[in-house]
Amino acid sequence: MLNKMGNSTRATLAFSVMALMLIMVGFVQSWSLSLTIVNLCLISSVMALGVNIQWGYAGLFNIGIMGFAALGGAAAMLVSIDPVPEAWAAGGWDILYSVLTLIATIIAARLVYTKMEKSRFRTIAMIVVLVTGYMSMRLFFDPAVSNIESTDSAKTGFLGGLGLPIILSWPVGGLFAAGAAWVIGKIALGLRSDYLAIATLGISEIVVAVLKNEDWLTRGVKNVNGLPRPVPYELDLQASDWFVSLVARIRSGSLEGLEGLAREAALKEVVIEASSVFVKLCYAGLFATVLLIILTLCVLALNSPWGRMMRAIRDNETAAGAMGKNVTGRHLQIFILGSAVCGIAGAMLTTLDGQLTPTSYIPLRFTFLIWVMVVVGGSGNNLGAIFGGFLIWFVWVESEPAGVWLMSFLTSWMAEGNSVKDHLIQSAQHMRLFVMGLVLLLVMRFTPSGIIPERNR
């Protein structure tokens, strides 16, 4: 039946069911939880759009999404956290000198490579330039790192950031990811697709390893907490007269009949709940705006001559190349664009979390799940990728409590303390892996192109 529906009907039905499930979570569990899921679904959808740009438009197999998301997270910290004056005084300027030395070394090596003819002398000159530049850089870098990391290491121990509004880190995260994508693309694009997959996986692991170990830059595994918000804080809202008055008017029915301390306690409780919901609604508005902007740009690009060219390259690279299209150049272009979108999503996620936690970047969350979103939703279809982001993250979050409820119901006839009952309930948290695999298998069996597949043109 689903296969006989048109894409517009499928999309309407799919998003309607998704909205209904989120509303049910609000009524059955809490609206705060429902909005938390919505925010994470929005961010996941942005990331899924980035992968869909690469795979759905051009057939590029990127399994290093984790690294691009981590670069976005690092951008959120580096842009928003205030600089640490003591750390800068201890070694910050030496770090700048080492970076300038590295840049000068790369430029010198490039000049040697391009200006000299291929010979043994050029090879020797390249080695001399690279070794001299590397050793010069380490003369500044090593003592600077030691001095920075020993500066009040319990609280800081790193250089900090620029102290700018964190929302500016979203485009900066995209630029960081785009830069890394350019490096990977120049190395691996134009070769077999498996080389690209290996390169993206390797670079992503390197990026996460740097975030974990370079304490002077990101505090490593000690994390960076208390990132500033682009939305109000709950405590500030709870202390604001306008917000308390607004909540009192909205919840006047539940407060009716209460007097004195009883009314004050009830009002305080609903204000606390409302402040959490209000903050999450503000986040949802920001994230939805970014998603709509990226979606609009994706749709315009896909329907343009550029989009038709990309689909032609994806479907038959040989024929497109024979018609004069620069296949490698276009692959590099779309790889950079898709990675930039993933970087933006990574910065948004760190903004929502309010902290940079390098150990949280694992392939299961930031690569496998995102690919499942694209495949289940429908690769090549922007709305399909967005729906996949909502559906898969919802299933990932809700399958655990649903599993606990299911196991409790199925074992309700067993006596308390029964070892089998306890084991089944304690193992219910692993239901999410089973449910995720089941969803993927069902979609691949009954609608292999995804729930909202690419429209044939």
Image (cartoon, rainbow, N blue to C red):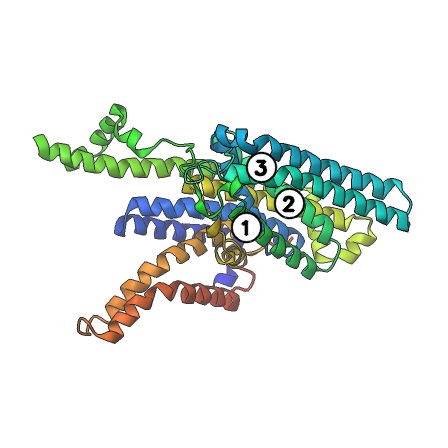
Judge left or right: residue 408 versus residue 174: left
Q: Which of 387 and 363 is in front in this view?
A: 363
- In the structure shown, which secondary structural element does the residue marked by tag 2 occupy? helix
Identify the amino acid type marked 1.
Answer: Val
SS state under label 1: helix
Q: In the rendered structure, which amino acid carries the disc numbered 2?
A: Ala
Q: Label 3, secondary structure: give it.
A: helix
Residue 401: x percent and y percent?
A: 31, 59
The total number of labels drawn is 3
Residue 180: image tag: 2
**Res. 289 visible in picture:** yes
**Relative horizontal placement of residue 235, taking residue 353 as reference (left or right):** left
Task: Tell me: 388 left or right of 305.
Answer: left
| Residue type (three-letter) at the residue carrying disc 3 | Ala
Which percent across, then down, holds residue 54? 63, 51
Tag 1 residue: 208
Q: Kindly identify the residue that appears in the image at 27 percent across and 36 percent down.
A: 274
Looking at the image, do the residues carrying marks 1 and 3 touch, with CB atoms under 8 Å apart? no
Precedes in sequence: disc 1 or disc 3: 3
Which of pointers 1 and 2 indicates the residue nearer the eye? 1
Asked where in the image residue 140 lies, by quadrant, the reply is top right
Residue 144's label in the rendered image is 3
Whole-angstrom CA distance, mark 1 to mark 3, is 22 Å
Labels 3 and 2: the sequence-earlier one: 3
Residue at 75% from the left image edge and 54% from the top image edge: 190
Crowding near the residue tagged with mark 1, few <14, some 14–19, many ≥20 C-alpha atoms within 10 Å: many
In terms of depth relative to the viewer, which is nearer, 449 or 85? Answer: 85
Q: From mark 1 to mark 2, how far is it between C-alphas?
A: 13 Å
Q: Do the residues labelled 3 and 2 touch (CB within 8 Å)?
A: no
Between the C-alphas of marks 3 and 2, the distance is 25 Å
**First of labels 1, 2 by sequence position:** 2
Q: Is residue 444 above or below residue 454?
A: below
